[in-house]
Amino acid sequence: MAINLQKGQTINLRKNDRGEDVYDLSTVTIGLGWDVRKQGGFFSNLFNKEAEYDLDAVAFLLDSNGKVANMGSTVQRANGKQIVLYGGDVIYFNSMRHPSGQIWLTGDNRTGEGDGDDEQIIVKLDKLDQRYQKIIFVVSIYQGNTNRQHFGMIENAFIRAVDARGKEITKFSLSGDESLNGMCSMVFAEAYRHNGDWKFRAIGEPYRTDNFIEVLVPYTYR
């Protein structure tokens, strides 16, 4: 049975609460979901239907020093747009698949509508190179400050881990309240190696910035 985590709580991803190996970490789905809180009144609801809340899932792959060793490169598309942090250890909407092929982002949901996961990061934990000791999972509201959108407007937000056989291992839920007003990014959770296995910790640390690069800064070599 899946364990519902509280903020700050840690569990072993492979073992159950009796210490038995029950979960298959050959492919783990990190699912993220959310709903936009409905506002009262006919006109408010009418406008909310047109508004997009584009929440972006991001993953930082960290080395033994707790840093991103490969920041990727800058590439230029045919339309002239430059993309930075491409092909490195940061997985996000402009660099969706890690060069190793062991972790990737499945897509970009711009509304949060519907049941289940709105975005997913797939990671083959058992095959991930030993130089990666930790994965940080971040969610940012794209242009949240410009659009005056923040996590205080989000409800039923969650991050969960599902094993290769479709078994939900754990889930951490977080609904918006006044403490999250003005907060446009969130470090939701982390997965890290410990004594030859993988652990998962619920974090729920909010940031005012809507730019995940600012959240990334403490994890870079400077």
Image: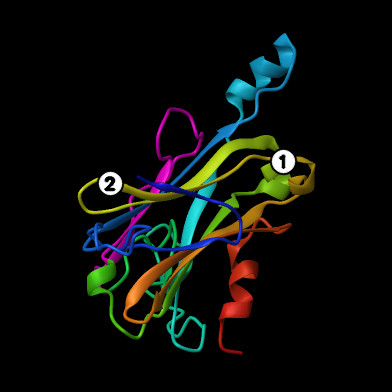
Q: Is residue 101 magenta?
A: yes
Residue marked by disc 1: 152
On the question of residue 70 being in view, the answer is yes
Q: Position of residue 189 (x, y in %)?
A: 52, 60
Q: Is residue 116 above or below residue 32?
A: above
The quadrant in which the N terminus is found is: top left
Label 2: how many Cα within 10 Å (few below 14, some 14–19, many 20+): some
Q: Position of residue 83 (x, y in %)?
A: 46, 66
At x 50%, y 34%, the residue is: 112
Q: Is residue 154 above or below residue 5?
A: above
Residue marked by disc 2: 167
Q: Which mark is residue 127?
A: none
Residue 212 relative to residue 181: left or right:
left
Region rendered in magenta = 100-124
The quadrant in which the C terminus is found is: bottom right
In this rendering, the label closer to the viewer, 2 or 1: 2
Element on which disc 2 rests? loop
Q: Is residue 21 above or below residue 127?
A: above
